[in-house]
Amino acid sequence: MSCDISSEDDLAQAKNKIEQMGSVDILIHNAGALVNKPFEKLTKEDFKKVYEVNVYGCHLF
């Protein structure tokens, strides 16, 4: 099973699948995003995407 950790809908679907299976034996939580440009060149959208994956997505999971 995989999901986009920045998507609340994907996380809800993953939660439902886990509840249907009963338990999780192995979980690999491997998510990270970056924008390959200097910090001062980041747009609001760039920063939002990085934050959604690296910080907020981990909090939701």
Image (cartoon, rainbow, N blue to C red):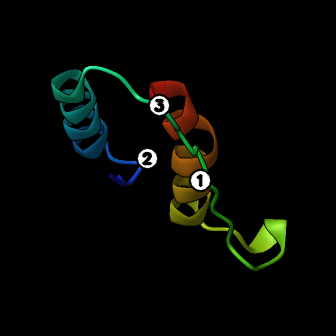
Q: Earlier in the sequence, mark 3 or mark 1?
A: 3
| Residue at screen point 77% across, 79% down | 37
Q: CA distance from mark 2 to mark 1?
A: 7 Å
Q: What secondary structure is marked by label 3?
A: loop
* 12 to the left or right of 37: left
Precedes in sequence: disc 2 or disc 3: 2
Relative to 42, does residue 53 appear above or below in the rendering? above
Residue at the location (84% across, 75% down)? 38
Q: Amino acid at mark 3?
A: Asp
Does residue 46 sit above or below 58 in this rendering? below
Separation of disc 3 and disc 1 at Cα?
19 Å
- Residue occupying image coordinates x 50% and y 39%: 57
Residue 26 position, x and y percent, is 52, 37
How far from the left and from the top, in percent, is residue 23? 35, 22
Q: Which mark is residue 25?
A: 3
Q: Earlier in the sequence, mark 2 or mark 1?
A: 2
Q: Nearer the viewer, mark 2 or mark 3?
A: 3
Residue type highlighted by circle 2: Ile
Q: Give the mark toward the camera: 3 or 1.
A: 3
The residue tagged 2 is 5
Image disc number at residue 31: 1
Q: Is residue 38 above or below residue 52?
A: below
Crowd around label 3: few <14 · some 14–19 · many ≥20 (10 Å): few
